[in-house]
Amino acid sequence: MRSLSSLLLTGGAGFIGSTLVRKILERSEVEKLIVLDKFTYAGDRNHLVGPDHDSRLTIVEGDILDQSLTTRLIEEHQFTGVLNLAAESHVDRSIASTQEFALTNVLGASSLLEICRLLKVPFLQCSTDEVYGSTPFPKKFDEFTKLRPSSPYSASKASADLLTIAAHTTYLQDVVIARCTNNYGPRQHREKLIPTLIYHAMRDEPLPIYGSGQQIRDWIHVEDCALGLIAAFEHGTPGKIYHLGARDEHTNLGIARTILKQLGKPESLICHVDDRPGHDARYALATRHSLESLGWKARIPFRTGFEETVREISSQLRIV
Ligand code: NAD
C-alpha cells in the first residue's frame, strides 16, 4: 500500500483536481499536499478557496514541463507519490489546435514520469475512457482493450498511457493508470457540456447539441472519481490500469432534457448543430476489476448527484 503522507498533485486547480484536493485533505495521514498548476484558462485559484486554509496545502504556480521546477519540488519534499492530473482537457480545442495537447499531455507526463523514476517516487497517471474510442453497444471495454483514440485529445492521453506502461515494463517503475469516464459536479469549466447547457438554459438561449445528440457517455460524480483516484494510487498494483466509471449511461440529448426539466425550461430550446468531427458514439467501461482489486465503486446515484450539480452550477452562474 502506498502512503498518502506527502503528495504532489498536478492540475489541482482544475475541475477534478480541486475535488481531489478536498478528498485528499479529508485523510488524517496526509501531512503535506503540494498542488502544481500552470493556471491555464482552465485552472482557477477560486477552486481552492476553502482548502487553501489548510496548512498542509501549498499551491505552486508552474508548468509540469519545467523539469528544473518539478525535480526541485520532488527532491525537496520527498513525496510519497505524484498524481498527474494536469492536462489540456477539451476535445474541441484539441481539434482546433493539437500542439498544447502534445506538449502538456504527452511531453509533460513523460517528463514527470522520468523524474519519478529517477527519484523513485510512485506515479499515478489520470487517464480517460476516450483512449479506447467508441464502444459498440452493449459492450463494455475492459483494461485489456486495444487503444483506438479518435480525437487529438484522446490520442495525447493514450500516448501518455503507453509511456506509463512502458516505464513499468522497461524499468519496473512503480506506476498506476486510472481511466475515468465523464465526470460531472461542481467547478467544471463553462466550456464543457453540462455547464454550457445550464448556462444557455438559464438565459433562454438555444442549447447546442452536436448532431443527433444520441452519443452515450457514462457519467460519474467527480467525488466518486476522486475517491477512485485515491484508491488506485493507494492500492493499485504497479503497472496496472484501473477503470473508474459509474455504469450510468446517458445520451447527450437526455442530459439536455434533464437540465431543462430541472430548470423549468422548454425542450424547444434544444438546437442540433453540426456534429463534432470524429465524434465517438459511446463510451462504456467495465469496472469489475476496480471493485475487486481496489474495493472501490461509484456510490453517488446519478439522479441526486446530477440534481445537486445543476443547482450548484446554476447558482454559481447566477453570481457571475
Ligand atoms: P481541467 O481542464 O478542468 O483542469 C486541468 C488543470 O491542469 C487546470 O487547472 C490547468 O491549469 C492545469 N494544467 C494544464 N496544463 C498544465 C501544465 N502544463 N502544467 C501544470 N498544470 C497544467 O481538467 P479536468 O476535467 O479536471 O481533468 C483532469 C484530468 O482528468 C485530465 O488529465 C483529464 O484528461 C482527465 N479526465 C477528465 C475527465 C472529465 O470528465 N473531466 C474524464 C476522464 C479523464
Image (cartoon, rainbow, N blue to C red):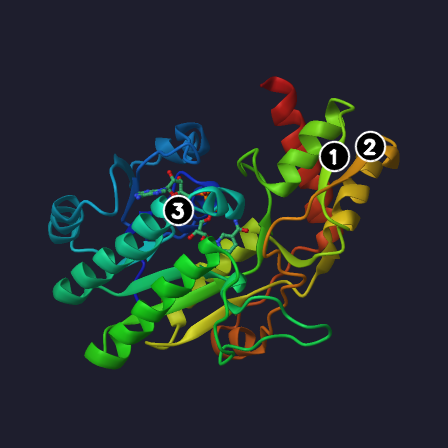
Whether residue 29 appears in this view of the structure is no
Question: Contact (CB < 8 A) between labels 2 and 3?
Answer: no
| Residue drawn at the location 71% of the way across and 53% of the way down | 302
Question: Contact (CB < 8 A) between labels 2 and 1?
Answer: yes
Q: In what element is the residue under mark 1?
A: strand
Residue named by callout 2: 269
Specify the amino acid type for callout 2. Answer: Leu
Q: CA distance from mark 2 to mark 3?
A: 41 Å
Residue named by callout 1: 207
Specify the amino acid type for callout 3. Answer: Leu
Q: Between disc 2 and disc 1, whose residue precedes? A: 1
Whether residue 179 appears in this view of the structure is yes
- Label 1 neighbourhood size at 10 Å, few (<14), some (14-19), many (20+)? many
Kindly identify which numbered label has been placed on residue 140: none
Rendering coords of residue 37 (x, y %): 31, 39
| Residue drawn at the location 66% of the way across and 26% of the way down | 315
In this rendered view, identify the residue nearer to me: 314 or 278.
Answer: 278
Q: Between disc 3 and disc 1, whose residue precedes? A: 3
Specify the amino acid type for callout 1. Answer: Leu
Residue named by callout 3: 25
Tell me the quadrant of the picture where the C terminus can be found: top right
Q: Answer with the quarter of the image where residue 50 lies.
A: top left
Tell me the quadrant of the picture where the N terminus can be found: bottom left
Rendering coords of residue 98 (x, y %): 40, 48
The residue carrying mark 1 has its beta carbon less than 8 Å from ligand 1: no
- Label 3 neighbourhood size at 10 Å, few (<14), some (14-19), many (20+)? some
Q: In what element is the residue under mark 3?
A: helix
Mark 2 or 3, closer to the camera: 2
Position of residue 14 relative to residue 220, above or below, is above
